[in-house]
Structures are given as structure tokens and as C-alpha cells.
Amino acid sequence: MPLNDLQIPLLKLIPDASRSDILVIRRYQSGERIFEQDDPTTGLWFVMDGRVAIERIGADGNLTTTGVWIAGDIVGIAGLWDRSGYPGSARALSNPTVMGWIAREVVLRLHQELPQFGLEISRMLAERLRYVQEAVSSRQGRPIVNQVASVLLTLSSRMGPLIALTHEDLAHIIGTHRETVSRALQELTREGAVNSRHGAIDIVDRHKLEDWSMASDK
């Protein structure tokens, strides 16, 4: 069910009289681009419904998914203050994906005029940083099957036990090939930790998945 603007804490802090005037609602289908890497940061985006992947093409030409965001999350915040471009592209992952958008100059004005608005942005940025740090530290130098287990646990803490992502999406998050992720998921399925099906992964036994996540090797 789509969120309304009052279900998102940051939007709830904006006075009722002006919220409807400054919030633009846009709808996307799965696979559609919401914004492109290096495009000018025009404003702040809110996920109202669906899922969004942030994808970055590195200097080596490889595509990495730096995050998957769900209803209630904000995206596109990195360049609001310094006018830099978006560090990655945003791609809709579900039908439909509903986004809210507030222009950059309006967000900066609200940040100055409403102290609680600024504090909530700071809280969300701190939460985002912690999520990214945990995701990176859980993967470095470890066997792929353990990395997959760690990523699934991190995603399930935000998306619930049903993770609606493809094997290719997971491969982009980890930075490997789809076939490699598929083999890791087959192993986790044989162990009874997950159930992998087309376009989704079910967490069947969280304790088993945690064992795989914490192990340095299996």
C-alpha cells in the first residue's frame, strides 16, 4: 500500500498549508530511470511506494548497486548542498514505483526555517551511513556465499522476509556475476536458509542465514 505524505516523518514536519504545493508525485514502472548518474541534483526524492535501486558505474566501467531503498526512504540527497551531480542512477524496481519530489531550493529553505526538518535529515543520513558501512564491512574479502547471506540479512531488516530482488540485482549489490550469486543461492537453498524463486528470495530460516553470514568460510 502506498504511503501518504503524513506517514513519512520528514514530510510530516512540513506545514499542511504548503506541503501539497511543494510535493510533486511521479510514477514509474519497473526498470525506468528516475534520475541519472552525474545529472545535476534538482531536488530531494522520497520513495512513496515500491523499491528503488541506486546504481553507480565506476571508473572501471562496472555497475554496482550501492543501495536498495523502500517506501519511506529518501534518495538523491548527496548533492543538495554542494550542487554536485547525483553520485549514481536511480532505477525503479517495482510496478508501480511512486516517488515524491521537492525542489532543491525549497528543501534548503525548509532546512533553515524548520529546525526539526534539519534534524530529521541528519538522523536519516546517519542511518544511511550506518547501513552502508555495515553492508561494506560484511562483504570484504569473504566467500561469495557468506557475502550473499550478509546482504540478505541486511536487506531483510528493511524489506522483511520476502526480498523482491533478482539474482542480477544481488550481483550488482555485491559486485560479482549473476551466475555466481545464483550458485550461492542454490547452496543456501539446499541448507534450508532461503527459498529462491523468480524475482524474489524468501528468508526461510533466519538463524541458518545468520550462521552463514557470520562464518568466514564454510
Image: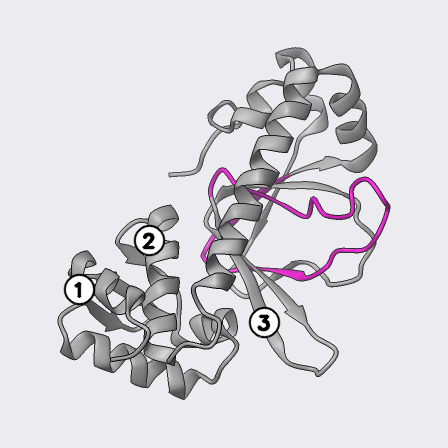
* Prevalent SS, magenta region: loop
x and y percent of residue 151 in the render? Answer: 39, 63
Of mark 2 and mark 3, the one earlier in the sequence is 3
* Residue assigned mark 3: 64
* Residue 84 seen anywhere in this rendered image of the structure: yes
For marks 1 and 2, give the one nearer the viewer.
1
Of mark 1 and mark 3, the one earlier in the sequence is 3
Give left or right: position of 196 versus 91.
Answer: left
For label 3, count other residues whose C-alpha is less than 10 Å away and answer few (under 14), some (14-19) or many (20+): many
Label 1's element? helix
* Residue assigned mark 1: 208
- Find residue 156 and name its label: 2
Q: Quadrant of residue 113?
A: top right
Residue 197 belongs to magenta span = no
Q: Which residue lies furthest to the front in this view?
A: 216
* Residues in magenta, as a range: 71-100
Residue type, numbered disc 3: Thr
x and y percent of residue 150 in the render? Answer: 36, 64
Image quarter of the C terminus:
bottom left
